Image: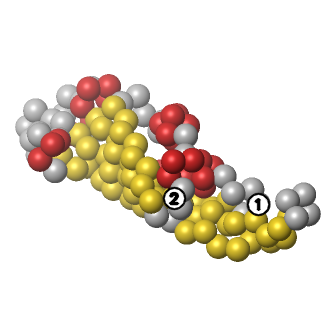
Amino acid sequence: MSELGNWRRYLSEWGCGAVLTHEDQTLAAIRALRNAMSRVCHMNFEPLGNIDLSKDVLVDVVVGVPKPKEVHVNELIKEIPLNCTKRVKVVNGGLEAEGAYNEGLGRNVKVVIAVAYITIYVRTSCGDV
């Protein structure tokens, strides 16, 4: 990615999440992000050299949901546990499917399925990652 300059990709992972009962795009996106993060296993950044998390680590997230305009991006940003630069982009994607009948709504709810892809970038003095 040319716009990232001297940032180097450290690791990446994907995840999926679903809401079965109440058509919440943000919650599906959060579950997808949590699912991806749960499989990221980095012990620490020490082997990379003198890394300052707040300046030298970037977590880049892309989440696909059926209705991206309904997602509260700030809620996704809060889910990233590192004290670093965070970039979240929500795009059209994921899936909606017919779910169970909801008495209160008088109709079947839509199951909302989201997919997340996270990449962690680091900036090091040696440039080798």
Task: Please indicate, yes or no, whether residue 115 appears anywhere in the rendered image.
Answer: no
Q: Residues within 10 Å of mark 1 (few under 14, many from 20)?
A: some
Q: Nearer the viewer, residue 51 or 89?
A: 89
In primary-sequence order, the first of circles 2 and 1 is 1
As shown in the figure, which amino acid type bears the numbered disc 2? Val
Q: Is residue 123 left or right of residue 83?
A: left
Separation (CA) of disc 2 from disc 1? 16 Å
Disc assigned to residue 125: none
Give the x, y percent position of residue 22: 75, 56
Give the x, y percent position of residue 101: 84, 70
Q: Which residue lies under the disc numbered 2?
A: 65
Q: Secondary structure at mark 1?
A: loop
Q: Nearer the viewer, residue 11 or 98?
A: 98
Q: Is residue 74 above or below residue 101?
A: above
Query: Can you tell which quarter of the image residue 44 is in?
Result: top left
Task: Please indicate, yes or no, whether residue 119 appears anywhere in the rendered image.
Answer: yes
Q: Secondary structure at mark 2?
A: strand
Figure colour scheme: secondary structure
Q: Is residue 99 left or right of residue 118?
A: right
Q: Which residue lies under the disc numbered 1?
A: 21
Residue extending furthest toward the front: 106
As shown in the figure, which amino acid type bears the numbered disc 1? Thr
Give the x, y percent position of residue 91: 42, 55
Residue at image point 58% right, 60% down: 17
Q: Nearer the viewer, residue 12 or 27?
A: 27
Residue extending furthest toward the right: 103
Residue at image point 51% right, 48% down: 69
Residue extending furthest toward the left: 126
Q: Is residue 126 left or right of residue 71?
A: left
